[in-house]
Amino acid sequence: MTEHDAVITWLLGVDPAIRWQVMRDLLDLPEADWGRERARVETDGWGARLLACQDPDGQWAGGAFFPADFTPDEWHRSGQPWTATAFALDQLREFGLDPRSDRARRTVALVGAHSRWDEGGQPYWQGEVEECINGRTVANGAYFGADVAALVDRLVDDRQPDGGWNCERAAGSPCSSFASTLNVLEGLLEYERATGGTDRSRDARRTGEDYLLTRHLFRRLTTGEPADPQFLDLLHPNRWRYDILRALDYFRAAGQLTGARPDRRLAEAIAHLRSRRQPDGTWRLDWDLRGRVWFKVNDGPGQPSPWITLRALRVLKWWGGNSA
């Protein structure tokens, strides 16, 4: 068995949420095969476990962004909690819960009827005020079939002069941030996949991509130094956080949707990703976010991560198969 075969075998043994994506993205199996495995996300493993934590009203932990029992002291003591509705939906989308399933459709309806944002009491699918949150809300809404067209229009209007987005825009920030921009780009891409997008949303996605590409995904324009050293460390789940693998996986997904060839400005990030591969063919989790979770999906920092390994392998497969 080759090193690559051993890694694939390891990934196939982890969880249905990983397995169906390995079958689709790495093994190129037909949808009839990976679709059956994807359906198991609802009934087995991490997906079923997270769905079992759902409240009767469709939310998780009784809140949209924060659990109902959250207090500011918790944030200072143990970190931001990740158990509320917004983050549960993020994970179910990553796991690949079939949006056509009855459970997914019921969840969309219940969240729309009962969940309100902590910041201003807005209905969930209308979005909040921060671009990071709204980008992921668009991604989840578009994926699961909610109507998020009005929120997409707001995000397009919230674009910064440099082409990206920043959650601190309302506080007066004049420039974009890596994390906010990627959160919005992922939402716009999911919206485009679901609906075809609009001229305005596609243009906004282009300028947001240019913001990241001109910085080679991690460098400051002014000095060329890494904007944040942690952008080069591999994190999962990312929640709202940025790293180069998350950005590379976005460009992979965008390229597969549109047929665009990989941009050569990704090459430096690709080289760094390759350098982080371990002798056994896996990638390790570099760090993890503090805070309350329903359960862990990695073995901890320093250990091989199936999620990071899956994402890295499919990025490199896309890059190697499409770049000249």
Image (cartoon, rainbow, N blue to C red):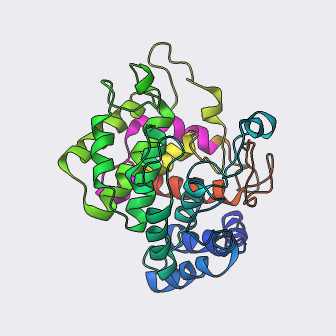
Relative placement, left or right, of 196 versus 10 is: left
Give residue 152's position: percent from left, percent from top. 31, 48
* Whole-percent x, y for residue 29 in the image: 49, 79
What's the magenta bit mostly, secondary-structure-wise? helix
Q: Is residue 254 left or right of residue 199?
A: right
Q: Nearer the viewer, residue 223 or 104?
A: 104
Q: Going 47% across and 42% down the picture, which residue do you hit?
A: 120
Q: Quadrant of residue 14?
A: bottom right
Tell me if 192 is positioned left or right of 112 in this view: left
Say which of 204 and 318 sits in front: 204
> Residue at left 75%, top 61%?
295
- Residue 264 magenta-highlighted: yes
Rendered location of residue 263, percent (x, y): 37, 41
Numbered label tally: 0
Q: Which residue is found at the position 37% from the left and 59% from the top? A: 256
Q: Is residue 293 above or below residue 128?
A: below
Q: Which of 116 and 45 lies nearest the eye of the viewer?
A: 116
**78 or 321, nearer to the observer:** 78
Q: Quadrant of the N terminus?
A: bottom right
How far across and how far down the image is residue 151, in percent? 33, 48
Q: Which residues are magenta?
A: 253-274
- Residue 148 appears in which quarter of the rendering? bottom left
Direction left: furthest residue: 199
Magenta span contains residue 67: no
Image point 47% across, 80% down: which residue? 101
Q: Eyeballing the image, is 183 above or below 303?
A: above
User: Which residue is most to the top?
Assistant: 223
* Horizontal relation, residue 2 to residue 192: left or right: right
From where the camera sits, is residue 322 visible?
A: no
Residue 268 appears in the picture as rendered: yes
